[in-house]
Amino acid sequence: MLSGRYRIVVLAFEGPDRYASVGGLGVRVTELSHALSAAGYPTTLLFVGDPDAPAVERIGEHLELRRWAQWLSRRYPASVYDGEAAKIADFGRSVPPFLIDEIIAPASANDQHVLVLAEDWQTADTLIDLDRGLRGRGLRHAATLLWNANNTYGFERIDLRALAKAATVTAVSRYMKFELAASGVGSLVVPNGIPSRLLDGAAPRDVETLRQALGAGPWFAKIGRYSPDKAWMQAIDALAHLREMNHAARLIVRGGKENYGEEVFARAEAHGLRTLQVTPSGRDLASIASAIAEASDQADIIDLRVYLEDPILAALYVSVEAVLANSRKEPFGLVGLEVMAAGGIPVCGSTGEEYAEPFVNAIVVDTDDSRELASALAALVEDPGLAPALRAAGPATAQRYTWPSVIATLIRKLPFIEAWQHAL
């Protein structure tokens, strides 16, 4: 455990506000900050937040939210990435002196040590300047600086070598570790995590409701933005192969608003697969199940046009034969763990999902070939003992990647990290 003399600061562009939560980063830093504070560590999450929310907000005894650059967010109201360049410049200019004067110097005077966890490329220059400022004030010993790589986005905009001299670089998976190594930077792996509450699994009544709505299958699901990286074409082609193998396979999808979705459905049409867009009357389970039931006999692919709350997502993960989380490039693969925690079966790719063991707790495809995916899904359908075994093994894997477990991994690495930074 971290000693009581530690204070933690999490730096990120995204955060818990709807304005500031665009992708997985917002979920990550929010859940991480809550887990740290729940464990008793005074934690500050500093992010570019909603311009109309309080600048400083306390949540519980140990968590503080600081919404940064709100004056710029008012000028750029669409989202956290609206006016990104101006916000990055302001973040880099104003955050380091604030942290030194308002958090690190006072903490040092009270014999406390500050652990700064910075996320993604937008914070890289901020951390470099923070290191420089601390040295100028003779306070470098008072803080441990970590910069975390969640993906390769923005690598071309970072001076990675300067960053590696200013802070310890961490990565969410071995895949990201190798990506950093290809850029000449070493890193320590501290995996991504999921909230412990997800281990409660899906409500059996919700699962039964969705299974009845879906009807005869086998049904598979794919959830994610429409991007070539998410291997949508492999999924569509595999569905067609399964039907050629006399498996009446069908697919339920929930994508984004990306234009690539039109290409995905054009591929389905070329295979003769019937796609039906379904917009439920509400976000509740009854409305969603009713809409699915009405469409299930009319389509090979149901395109579900509604936001899915976590309990409904969990029920969907369990209701289908497997969730196609296969990707061509996946820095970590959080969806696979969420599926395992619910009691479902994830289909993973071969990049970031190092937790996935083929035919032990998941289906894993090593290539972009749709025939490999179709063959693995056929094995799942044809072997009556395989699916129950995979469903039983998944939650035990997910347990190892809950935020408390991830935090324990980080803590065990801190003695080496601190010794290295103090030697600089």
Image (cartoon, rainbow, N blue to C red):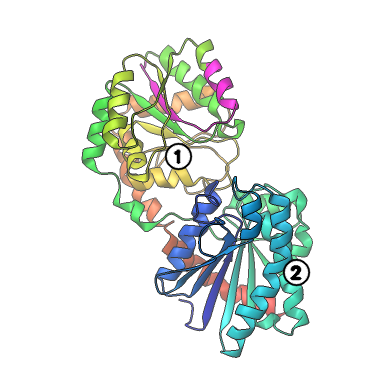
* Residue occupying image coordinates x 73% and y 54%: 86
Question: How far apart in space, not on screen, are marks 1 and 2 (Cα)?
Answer: 44 Å
Quadrant in the picture for residue 380: top left
The answer to whether residue 384 is seen in the rendering is: no
Q: Which sits in the foreground, 423 or 46? A: 46
Tell me which amino acid carries mark 1.
Pro
Q: Residue 84 location, x and y as percent? A: 69, 50
**Mark 1, residue position:** 358
Residue labelled with disc 2: 129
- Kindly state the secondary structure of the residue where label 2 is placed: helix
Quadrant location of the C terminus in the rendered image: bottom right
Mark 1: secondary structure: loop
Q: Position of residue 278 (x, y in %)?
A: 39, 23
Q: Which residue is located at x 75 percent, y 58 percent?
A: 160
- Give neighbour class at mark 2: few <14, some 14-19, many 20+ (Cα, 10 Å): some
Q: Residue at x 52, y 58 (%)?
A: 29
Which quadrant of the rendered structure holds the N terminus?
bottom left
Which amino acid, by three-letter code, is at mark 2?
A: Asp
Quarter of the figure with residue 340: top left
User: Is 313 or 47 nearer to us in this picture?
Assistant: 47
Q: Position of residue 420 (x, y in %)?
A: 68, 75
Q: Nearer the viewer, residue 202 or 415?
A: 202
Front of the two marks 1 and 2:
2
The answer to whether residue 250 is above or below residue 183 is above
Q: Is residue 325 visible?
A: yes
The segment highlighted magenta reads 247-267
